[in-house]
Image (spheres, grey):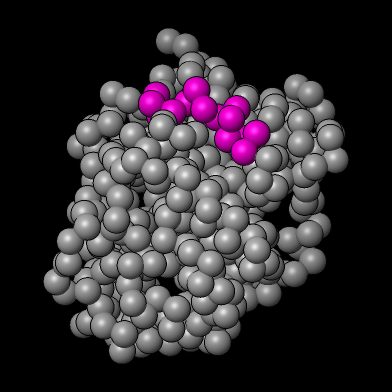
């Protein structure tokens, strides 16, 4: 994650993370990305079932019953292991996690074990009663996926009325005092709505938004041609920065992040370097703490059937299953060649990535996207929009 408000608008300083020693167990949620131990934030896809039909769904979910999902008892054992391992956050995702009958029990148990519980949902099932139950679990945050305004969102999510239902869900969360934010996946079908998403933040008094770059996984693997060009991506990132700054300038700060393209960090730094060289030194220090992409190190995924993945998009490769070994054992087992390389992937990237002077900042970006396009895990991420000059490669 690249915190636009944190880095560009100065919502935090390097000293904020240093004050806690940069240890995951001590850092508050908004500083976790700057931890030095990189204990994994774990995404648990608690169910594959979903009531929507999103065109970019990485899990290929449908509204049907799937066999083989972890039981409540197995989920409790997973949470126990993660808590003992020191994983700071459990992100309950899906499919649609609210379609799982024991989700409140599981989320509440995670918080009782000292973990920060977060739910990623399409928001359409959050009635007033569900919002009350969510509050009772003690969870930290509800992220609601909205991929456009009105019909744009509904077409993207495959169900008419999904946008209005999600807005009702957001309002129900806010009534219960639950921190809620938006998740928006950028593509050519909805890029025209980004400004309207910022207006929605203002109109509904929503404190946070994450803009996700498209990852080619699941049904999203069919959307490669609908991803933005490099030039379009640069303009979008500039727009997000400008809109974020506008909120701060008007005394209405919002937490704004971009996700799944760590070229954003370098791009933002280079912009700050031109505008405010003094501030740029602090931005660079924070980006070095962040370390770029952390798939297989600072973020991991457990699938509905117990399979362990490097992140929620890397579903085609499993390191093992928690029904056979604990997550903590699987995650630290570097006898697996891929796991070992992901722990130190900067040594294995090829091409422009290997020559890039910002490799320590970006971490080699998204390996899943590189593999999807080039059939090579270690090839350059095709979504990197930085020029050769910007990354320090001299022309031939």
Of 74 and 295, which appears nearest the observer?
A: 74
Numbered disc total = 0
Locate residue 131, reporting x and y percent.
Answer: 54, 69
Of 392 and 325, which appears nearest the observer?
A: 325
Of 291 and 254, which appears nearest the observer?
A: 254
Of 286 and 98, which appears nearest the observer?
A: 98
Q: Is residue 355 above or below residue 298?
A: above
Which residue is drawn at the image coordinates 34% and 41% (left, top)?
Answer: 160
Which residue is drawn at the image coordinates 33% and 34% (left, top)?
Answer: 155
Q: Residue furthest left?
A: 67
Q: Main secondary structure of the magenta part?
A: helix
Whether the magenta-drawn stretch holds residue 93 is answered as no
Which residue is drawn at the image coordinates 62% and 24% (left, top)?
Answer: 238
Q: Tell whether 157 sits left or right of 16.
A: left
Q: Is residue 99 above or below residue 51?
A: below
Residue range of the region highlighted in magenta in the rendering = 187-200
Query: Which quadrant holds the C terminus?
Result: top left
Q: Residue furthest top?
A: 396
Q: Is residue 346 above or below residue 127?
A: above
Q: Tell whether 283 sits left or right of 353.
A: right
The answer to which quarter of the image holds residue 202 is top right
Locate residue 23, reporting x and y percent.
Answer: 65, 71
Work out whether residue 43 can be spotted. no
Work out whether residue 146 can be spotted. yes
Which residue is drawn at the image coordinates 72% and 69% (left, top)?
Answer: 21
Locate residue 216, reporting x and y percent.
Answer: 29, 39
Locate residue 350, reporting x and y percent.
Answer: 34, 35
């Amino acid at each position: 994650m690249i915190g636009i408000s944190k880095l560009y608008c100065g919502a935090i300083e390097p000293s904020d993370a240093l004050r806690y020693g940069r240890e995951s167990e001590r850092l508050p949620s908004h500083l976790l990305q700057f931890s030095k131990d990189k204990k994994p934030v774990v995404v648990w896809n608690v169910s594959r079932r979903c009531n929507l039909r999103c065109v970019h769904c990485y899990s290929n979910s449908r509204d049907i019953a799937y066999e083989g999902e972890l039981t409540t008892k197995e989920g409790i054992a997973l949470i126990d292991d993660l808590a003992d391992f020191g994983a700071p956050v459990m992100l309950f995702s899906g499919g649609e996690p609210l379609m799982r009958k024991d989700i409140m029990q599981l989320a509440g148990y995670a918080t009782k074990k000292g973990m920060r519980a977060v739910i990623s949902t399409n928001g359409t099932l959050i009635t007033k009663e569900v919002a009350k139950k969510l509050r009772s679990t003690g969870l930290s945050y509800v992220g609601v996926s909205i991929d456009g305004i009105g019909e744009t969102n509904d077409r993207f999510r495959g169900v008419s009325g999904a946008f209005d239902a999600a807005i009702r869900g957001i309002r129900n969360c806010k009534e219960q005092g639950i921190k809620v934010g938006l998740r928006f996946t950028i593509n050519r079908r909805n890029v025209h709505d980004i400004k309207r998403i910022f207006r929605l933040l203002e109109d509904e008094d929503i404190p946070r938004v994450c803009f996700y770059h498209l990852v080619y996984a699941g049904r999203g693997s069919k959307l490669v041609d609908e991803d933005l060009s490099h030039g379009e991506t640069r303009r979008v990132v500039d727009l997000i920065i400008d809109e974020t700054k506008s909120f701060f300038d008007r005394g209405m700060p919002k937490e704004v992040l971009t996700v799944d393209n760590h070229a954003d960090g370098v791009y933002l730094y280079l912009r700050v370097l031109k505008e405010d060289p003094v501030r740029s030194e602090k931005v660079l220090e924070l980006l070095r703490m962040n370390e770029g992409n952390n798939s297989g190190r600072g973020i991991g995924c457990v699938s509905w059937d117990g399979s362990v993945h490097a992140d929620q998009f890397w579903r085609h490769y499993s390191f093992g299953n928690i029904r056979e070994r604990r997550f903590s054992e699987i995650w630290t087992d570097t006898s697996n060649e891929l796991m070992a390389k992901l722990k130190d992937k900067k040594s294995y990237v090829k091409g422009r990535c290997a020559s890039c002077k910002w490799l320590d900042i970006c971490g080699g970006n998204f390996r899943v996207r590189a593999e999807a396009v080039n059939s090579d895990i270690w090839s350059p991420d095709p979504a990197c929009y930085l020029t050769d000059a910007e990354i320090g490669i001299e022309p031939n």
